[in-house]
Image: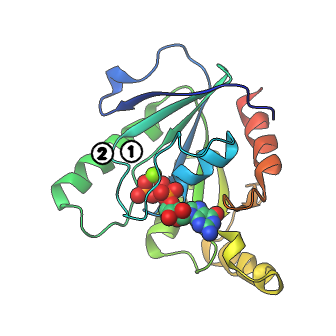
Amino acid sequence: MKVTKADFIISAVRPNQFPEDGLPEIALCGRSNVGKSSLINRMINRKNLARTSSTPGKTQQLNYYLINDDIYFVDFPGYGYAKVSKTQRAAWGQMMENYLLEREPLKLVMQMIDMRHPPTKDDIMMYDWLKHHGLPVCVVTTKMDKIPRSRRAKHAKVIKEDLGLRPGDPFIQFSSEEGIGREELWAVIAGYAGL
Ligand code: GTP
Ligand code: MG
């Protein structure tokens, strides 16, 4: 995919702020710090359009990015971040659930998992929830560059097994640092978005 244009559109906190043009939307969800914002930057080859941070919990709204005037990436707040208050977590949870269940232009959820570790309970719950509701999911493992080559296949196997990856769900091994997996992921996205 040749990205010629990428714009930050809005940090939405309410559905009436979502775009109304009906363009396909791809949601990114995963734990805080898993690398969601970094993945967006790598996919569009820009250093800092999506704000990244070593402090987890930075992304607190649904952040919309428009790419090539064709498709939106929707960056979700990370789940599993302990320092966020219960009330706030409940509010995000409700907003994300409504979005995932009701958003008509949503074409694919990229569920991101840190490749260095087995999936957490939250990761497994999230994946089960998405599948229970019949949502199309692509599992993306992040920070692949941090794992020695000789151990990557083992890590991938553990993640697939622990998640119970459903047949047919794409599984992409990714590194925002090195750009591994970028073309493969664009091909998956283009397929689901009908680009
Ligand atoms: P929240 O917005 O807090 O939910 O986090 P996020 O999922 O958007 O994570 P973010 O992209 O901000 O990345 C978190 C940290 O991980 C940053 O320090 C990134 O530089 C680092 N990081 C993300 N992806 C990679 C990767 O592929 N390789 C390496 N080595 N570091 C990465
Ligand atoms: Mg982020």
Does any portion of residue 132 appear in the rendered image? Answer: no
Q: Image height check: is 161 above or below 6? A: below
Residue furthest top in the image: 21
Which numbered marker is on residue 94? Answer: 2
Name the residue located 34 percent from the left edge and 58 percent from the top edge: 57
Left or right: where 95 falls relative to 42: left
> Is there CB contact under 8 Å for labels 1 and 2?
yes
- Closer to us: 133 or 94: 94
- Closer to us: 29 or 43: 43
- Closer to us: 136 or 183: 183
Q: Residues within 10 Å of mark 2 (few under 14, many from 20)?
A: few
SS class of the residue under badge 2?
Answer: helix
Give the Cα distance between marks 1 and 2. 5 Å
Three-letter amino acid code at disc 1?
Answer: Glu
Three-letter amino acid code at disc 2?
Answer: Gln
Residue furthest front in the image: 47
Left or right: where 61 falls relative to 9: left
User: Residue 194: image x %, image y %?
Assistant: 76, 27
Quadrant assignment, res 43: top right
Left or right: where 83 falls relative to 194: left
Name the residue located 35 percent from the left edge and 22 percent from the top edge: 17
Which numbered marker is on residue 97? Answer: 1
